[in-house]
Image: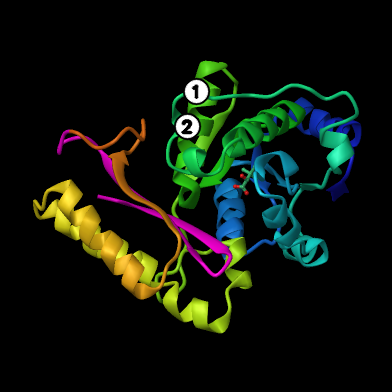
Amino acid sequence: MIFRTIPSLRAEIAAWKAAGERIGLVPTMGALHEGHLSLVNEARKTCQRVIVSIFVNPRQFNNPSDLALYPRTEEDDIALLTGTDAVFIPSVETMYPAGYCTAVHVGGLSTRLEGAHRPGHFDGMATVVTKLFTITGADCAFFGEKDWQQLQIVRRLVADLALPIEIIGCPTLRERDGLALSSRNRRLTPQAREIAPQLHSIMQETANSIRQGTPINEALNTGLSALKNAGFAPIDYLDCCHAETLEPAERNNDPLRLMAAVALDTVRLIDNIVI
Ligand code: PAF
């Protein structure tokens, strides 16, 4: 069932809650692919009711042309979600009515990596996610590990604000050639699509090199040169961080994550892998 207003969705959810059903939320910006559907499938395993939200959140786009170019495929998305208990598709005015002036800022974590390159992005994301949590009152929400920094920020805000929701991270889905699934991939030209999988292979080589004891900076410099030679430009970052705090890696026994953001033509690609 499709819901476009907050009261109509809440009325439906109230009935589910009254019946004691566990409710899962999968927040999306549409342009759905197998990665999103894997989150829905994961939600189905533990929840009697699954809500998918589709909202291209203007507040998390720091670049107006990126917002304008973001793929919008509502009809196809709805067709992929037949069988989902609720698809919530609010308008911008529903989420941000006249006079709206509240924002959620998660300090520290939001300022590094993506935050440094996309000012305001994580404030917009944290704000809309918090609002989706409070609108739905879901028991749990499912996020892809592809957006690793986003997942850490959402976990932090839920802990800090004591929100009564469980956050479940789900593994990144990849094409056979290693390219992480993303709604942005459909904007790659055929030539860029050929180059794109090298992001993952170069990251794997870099992670292996760190695991084998190469000093982190040396491994990162080799990885950066490889990315440049492959044709990625600009390269926003290739960084090795503490997996949860996203502070620069210090101790080898810390949980580490290799994080990258690059572009091909105008398409920005991000990826991350465990070290
Ligand atoms: O990952 C996304 O698609 C978005 O950042 C999210 C979580 C749906 C919030 O707009």
Q: What's the amino acid at mark 1? A: Gly
Q: Nearer the viewer, residue 99 or 275?
A: 99
The residue that disc 1 covers is 107
Q: Position of residue 132 (x, y in %)?
A: 71, 33
Span highlighted in magenta in the image: 251-275
Q: What's the amino acid at mark 2? A: Thr
Does residue 41 appear left or right of residue 97 in this picture?
left
Can residue 230 be seen in this snapshot? Answer: yes
Q: Residue at x 53, y 25 (%)?
A: 106
Does residue 226 appear left or right of residue 214 in this picture?
right
Q: Residue at x 50, y 38 (%)?
A: 115
Q: Nearer the viewer, residue 154 or 123?
A: 123
Relative to 265, residue 211 above or below: above
Q: Nearer the viewer, residue 269 or 44?
A: 269
How crowded is the residue under tag 1: few (<14 C-alpha within 10 Å), some, or many (20+)?
few
Does residue 27 appear left or right of residue 154 in this picture?
right
Disc 2 is placed on an element classified as helix
Q: Are marks 1 and 2 in contact (CB under 8 Å)?
A: yes
Q: Residue at x 74, y 53 (%)?
A: 84
Q: CA gap, disc 1 to disc 2?
A: 7 Å
Answer with the quarter of the image where residue 18 lies.
Answer: top right
Residue 151 counted in the magenta span: no
Answer with the quarter of the image where residue 164 lies.
Answer: top right
Q: Position of residue 137 (x, y in %)?
A: 71, 27
Can residue 9 be seen in this snapshot? Answer: no
Relative to 61, residue 212 above or below: below
Cβ at disc 1 under 8 Å from ligand 1: no
Residue 261 counted in the magenta span: yes
Disc 1 is placed on an element classified as loop
Q: What is the chief secondary structure element of the magenta stretch?
A: strand
Relative to 145, residue 103 above or below: above
